């Protein structure tokens, strides 16, 4: 059976699979791809070859937000795009997306493809999909039991970066030493993004010691002059010449205005231009996402100033300081995935106007089955002086973590008495305990947040998950 | 005095929580514990006056740097333990403090041999990842340490296990006569073959004064295993004339222990 026939068969069958799955109530964003690849290997590469431009976003943190921002910035610049949903970022999900949009991709005015790709799937996707712009956000310890360690990811990424065509562009975070070192292996054009200087307030990775990591070039001690977020920041090796380069496009982060947004100034080295705005997504992590997205779309020809201007008025994706009104209280939903992201949530939440807090940790595969990571972050400042409830399958471990927090005496209640059966239960009890017009801050791991969102969507308090 | 070993390399899975647990449990008993951080560049005097050495796990790529550090400091560390300092070695530290650790590429990194084990990282073979319940011997001093506390908390019997989460590629073989920390189902623990997890060497056994506990379990290991934490703590405090540890309210600890034991029993 030739490729065309096999592809045709694969496409017909995946359409059937997709429709049946949707009829059964599933979102059908991955299964069709699995079926298609079985029937017709490399069908993805044949469809993808027709796409005018493919942007791939990968890394540990910020993939979803950065992908969404790139889509929004391109659309604001009048370019049409298609993208894969965040939950479908493995090869099967990418395949499903290409199949679903195959007609549009073979048309004359085909859209730009913007893909979020899981960091362990990047090599598999790269073997099938030509990449015109590869955006690497960062490489951080995350969900270690799923992937082993960051070493494994680095090994997979090295050939992908090396084999990126010279006409493609590699957009990489200058503030991530390991990533920057990996990027040295590229023959493609490289553009870097990062912070212009230390942010007004920063959240260093609490597990980061003053000497920090080792130098990826010579394994010597890597000194950090300042930290932007987690392991990202300005660095210089004490032993060799490895040092952070000045980013091609940089952002300086001002004060956060509570959850409303943060003032930022973007600068472009090439043109010397500077542009400021208040980004409606607080925190240094979103500054990194925004500057990554600006650098990516500038590589696709969008003018720097209009890219930055388009950032104002953008709304963050679900679970990133997502605001919901429930019974006259403002509920802020946040996804907490690892020490770095939770440390920033704690920092912003601790100083913000918050009345009550819900923290939930699950340990399903998508959350990270080893929940020990929250011992590397101190939640106590977020809970000090506030009523709170703990939820999720690992809430007892969370209570233990709080009990052993050095500042646990600040808690208004004993963690052992702050248990809720489910995130939804925790939220409704905290809403009831919050004065009208007050605020509930919710930090949940992935599956706990999905579970809560679907309960809220069923009660029409939230739109259902985007398709 | 508690020394945390090479935290810049060996604190990957929240193992700093083990130190936190020991320091806090001592503080609740009115014992002010001094904490010293021993970095890789430290000199050999780093282990003077140390009563308890705590070392955790790190990424495979750091194994060489750790081995180098131990080349210099391994003897001083071993001497301290020989003279009575206790040791908790988790995962990477467990491997590096043994006779040797052989990488998947075949490089053999010699260790100080303070723990009589040999570890090999296989070229192929699955990584051992998952929650683990390790059964203690009925006469284990760890179980004895936790009996009253578990009963008081309403969780009698939980003291007979140690619970945690493993994540390692290396396969560790215990030397002849070396006691395991606990027994686990096949496919888990030290090597997946002999149903052992970790190592427990009591004071004065084999000529070494210090209590040695080694394990592949994270969680971190000590918070939800208060009996193990207290065994280590009492050995350390005994050197300062403290013979009995005041009972603590360990309901939160045993509740987490019991829930995870249920969750991770096959």
Image: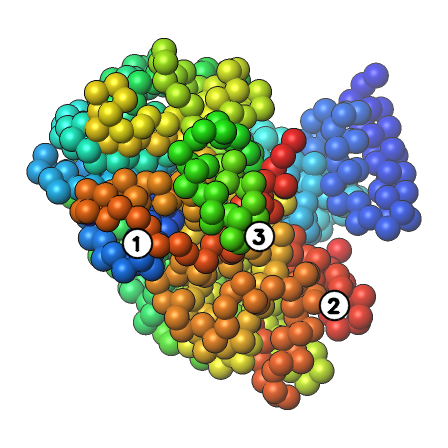
| Relative vertical location of residue B37 with respect to residue A334 in this rendering, above or below | above
To which quarter of the image does residue A430 belong? bottom right
Residue A456: numbered disc:
2
- Dot 1: element: helix
Residue at 68%, 61% (x, y): give it. Answer: A421
Residue B59, x across and y down, in percent: 37, 34
Viewer-proximal residue among A166 and A230 = A230
Q: Is label 3 in contact with label 2 (beta carbons under 8 Å)?
A: no
Question: Mark 1 highlights which residue?
Answer: B26
Residue at 56%, 45% (x, y): give it. Answer: B156
Q: Residues within 10 Å of mark 1 (few under 14, many from 20)?
A: many
To which quarter of the image does residue B187 belong? top right
Instruction: Please indicate, yes or no, whether residue B42 appears anywhere in the rendered image.
Output: no
Per the model, the C-alpha gap separating discs 1 and 3 is 23 Å
Per the model, the C-alpha gap separating discs 2 and 1 is 45 Å
Question: Mark 3 highlights which residue?
Answer: B154
Viewer-proximal residue among A108 and A397 = A397
- Dot 2: element: helix
First in sequence, mark 1 or 3: give its number: 1
Subunit under mark 3: B
Viewer-proximal residue among A244 and A338 = A338
- Dot 3: element: loop
Residue A379, x across and y down, in percent: 44, 63
Residue A292, x across and y down, in percent: 46, 56
């Amino acid at each position: 059976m030739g490729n065309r026939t096999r592809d045709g068969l694969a496409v017909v069958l995946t359409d059937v699979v997709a429709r049946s799955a949707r009829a059964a109530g599933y979102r059908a964003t991955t299964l069709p791809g699995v079926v298609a690849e079985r029937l017709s290997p490399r069908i993805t590469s044949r469809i993808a070859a027709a796409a005018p431009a493919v942007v791939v976003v990968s890394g540990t943190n910020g993939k979803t937000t950065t992908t969404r921002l790139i889509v929004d910035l391109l659309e604001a610049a009048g370019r049409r795009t298609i993208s894969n949903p965040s939950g479908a970022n493995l090869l099967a999900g990418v395949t499903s997306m290409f199949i679903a949009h195959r007609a549009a991709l073979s048309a004359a005015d085909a859209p730009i493809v913007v893909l979020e790709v899981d960091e362990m799937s990047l090599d598999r996707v790269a073997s099938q999909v030509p990449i015109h712009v590869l955006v690497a956000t960062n490489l951080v310890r995350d969900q270690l039991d799923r992937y082993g360690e960051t070493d494994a990811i680095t090994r997979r990424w090295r050939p992908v970066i090396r084999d990126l065509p010279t006409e493609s562009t590699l957009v990489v975070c200058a503030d991530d030493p390991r990533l920057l070192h990996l990027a040295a292996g590229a023959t493609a054009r490289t553009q870097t993004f990062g912070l212009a200087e230390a942010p007004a307030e920063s959240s260093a990775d609490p597990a980061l010691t003053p000497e920090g990591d080792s130098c990826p070039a010579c394994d010597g001690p890597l000194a950090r002059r300042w930290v932007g977020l987690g392991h990202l920041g300005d660095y210089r090796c004490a032993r060799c010449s490895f040092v952070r380069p000045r980013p091609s496009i940089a952002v300086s982060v001002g004060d956060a205005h509570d959850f409303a947004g943060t003032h930022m100034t973007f600068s472009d080295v090439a043109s010397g231009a500077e542009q400021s705005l208040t980004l409606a997504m607080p925190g240094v992590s979103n500054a990194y996402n925004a500057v990554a997205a600006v650098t990516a779309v500038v590589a696709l020809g969008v003018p720097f100033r209009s890219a930055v201007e388009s950032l104002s008025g953008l709304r963050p994706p679900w679970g990133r300081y997502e605001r919901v009104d429930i019974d006259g209280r403002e509920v802020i939903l946040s996804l907490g995935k690892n020490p770095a992201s939770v440390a920033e949530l704690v920092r912003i939440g601790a100083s913000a106007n918050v009345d009550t807090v819900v923290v939930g940790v699950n340990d399903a595969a998508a959350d990270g089955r080893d929940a020990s990571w929250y011992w590397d972050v101190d939640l106590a400042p977020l809970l000090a002086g506030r009523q709170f409830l703990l939820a999720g399958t690992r809430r007892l471990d969370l209570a233990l973590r709080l009990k052993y927090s050095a500042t646990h005496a600040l808690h208004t209640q004993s963690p052992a008495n702050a248990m809720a059966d489910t995130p939804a239960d925790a939220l409704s009890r905290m809403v009831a305990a919050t004065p009208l017009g007050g605020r509930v801050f919710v930090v949940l791991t992935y599956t706990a947040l999905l579970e809560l969102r679907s309960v809220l969507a069923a009660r029409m308090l939230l739109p259902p998950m985007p398709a | 005095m508690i020394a945390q070993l090479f935290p810049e390399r060996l604190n990957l899975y929240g193992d700093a929580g083990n130190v936190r647990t020991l320091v806090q449990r001592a503080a609740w008993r009115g014992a002010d514990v001094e904490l010293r951080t021993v970095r890789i560049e430290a000199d050999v005097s780093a282990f003077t006056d140390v009563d308890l050495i705590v070392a955790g796990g790190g990424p495979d790529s750091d194994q060489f740097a750790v081995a180098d550090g131990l080349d210099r400091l391994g003897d001083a560390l071993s001497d301290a333990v020989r003279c009575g300092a206790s040791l908790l070695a988790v995962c990477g530290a467990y491997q590096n403090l043994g006779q040797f650790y052989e990488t998947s590429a075949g490089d053999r990194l010699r260790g100080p041999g303070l723990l009589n084990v040999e570890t090999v990282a296989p070229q192929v073979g699955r990584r051992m990842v998952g929650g683990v319940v390790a059964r203690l011997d009925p006469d284990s001093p760890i179980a004895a340490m936790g009996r009253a506390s578990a009963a008081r908390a309403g969780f009698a019997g939980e003291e007979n296990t140690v619970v945690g989460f493993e994540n390692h590629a290396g396969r560790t073989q215990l030397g002849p006569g070396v006691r395991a920390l606990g027994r686990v189902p096949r496919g888990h623990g030290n090597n997946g073959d002999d149903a052992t997890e970790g190592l427990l060497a009591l004071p004065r056994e084999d000529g070494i004064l210090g209590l040695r506990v080694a394990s592949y379990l994270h969680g971190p290991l000590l918070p939800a295993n208060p009996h193990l934490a207290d065994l280590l703590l009492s050995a350390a405090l005994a050197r300062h004339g403290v013979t009995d540890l005041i009972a603590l309210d360990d309901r939160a600890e045993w509740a987490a222990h019991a829930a995870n034991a249920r969750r991770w029993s096959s």
